[in-house]
Image: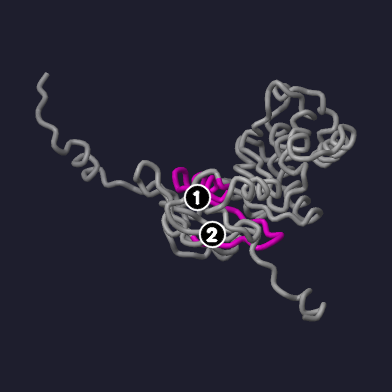
Amino acid sequence: MSASTQSTAPRPPALAVRGLCAAYDGVRVLEDITFAVEPNEIFVIMGASGAGKTTLLRHVLGLSQPIAGEIDLLGEALFPATRAQLYRLRRQIGVAFQHGALINSMSVIENIELPLRQHTRLDRNTIRIMSRMKLELMNLAHVENFMPAQLSGGMLKRAGLARAVVMDPRVLFFDEPSAGLDPATADELDSLILRLRDAHHMTIVIVTHALESAARIADRVMIVGDGRVRALDTLDNLRHLEDDYISTLLGRRTRWREVDGDALLDRLTADIEDLGE
């Protein structure tokens, strides 16, 4: 095979999910979930509360085992996989949690250094320099000696993101990056996510409720509802779909509907006997 042929060959998906089904206590919460995330893509997963987004995230991280289906991460099957295989795969991904998930007894810089200390044999000086580089990227160099309790919500998010990317992962998972942030801080975090993708060629998978954030950063959006994939496309194309669930989620239609007063009274008083005084 020639070098030119090799350079033009399509790359496999960074994440591929096929026919994923999941259940808790015998109750199905995910049903036949199928999608693929391309390398260097910002892929956003949206859905109402209880739609199954967090459950899906746990499965693609290998934290929960599906009852059916397949998950390939960076070209390798998550299930079945040995502990050593999972360990190797997880060294190539980063996870930024909703509230930062920093260890309260450690300073910011110590939190950022933790993955490097656990998973590499680098010397202390190199670890400190690499961690400071990520804090500089997040505009947090001035708080490296702060404790997590001293940080604002936006700083906690950025510190958690710095720890998630300190080992330059190939795939970054980010749970609700904009939750609880004011619009200016959320916009700043979105800009950071775009810079990470463009400068470090990361694939980024984001779970979010924030429509404004998705509009700024998403290459494609997958909408999950009732444990199923309801739609997967660019956000612009999704806005034109005639679907009540999607329209409500994207703000095109309110979930509250006008209720007939007589019908409401009938529902409220159904099967109620005269209780007397």
Considering every residue shown, the one lying at the far top of the view is 277
Residue on which the image places disc 2: 17
Disc 2 packing (10 Å; few <14; some 14–19; many ≥20) = many
Quarter of the picture containing the N terminus is bottom right
Disc 1 packing (10 Å; few <14; some 14–19; many ≥20) = many
Residue 213 % position (x, y): 64, 49
| Element on which disc 1 rests | loop
Residue occupying the point 21% across, 44% down:
262
> Which labelled disc corresponds to residue 135?
none
State the CA–CA distance, disc 1 to disc 2. Answer: 18 Å
Give 241 or 100, whichever is nearer the viewer.
100
* Residue 42, magenta (yes or no): yes
Residue 60 % position (x, y): 56, 51
Is residue 139 rendered to the left or right of residue 157? right
* Residue 153, magenta (yes or no): no
Is residue 233 rendered to the left or right of residue 124? left
| Element on which disc 2 rests | strand
Residue occupying the point 80% across, 29% down:
109
Amino acid at the residue labelled 2: Val
Is residue 223 rendered to the left or right of residue 170? left
Q: Relative to residue 55, is residue 149 depicted above or below?
A: above
Residue 228 % position (x, y): 44, 56
**How many marks do you count on the picture?**
2
Amino acid at the residue labelled 1: Gly
Residue 12 % position (x, y): 66, 66
Nearer the N terminus, badge 1 or badge 2?
A: 2
Q: Which residues are magenta?
A: 34-62
Where, by quadrant of the figure, is residue 106 drawn? top right
> Which labelled disc corresponds to residue 47?
1
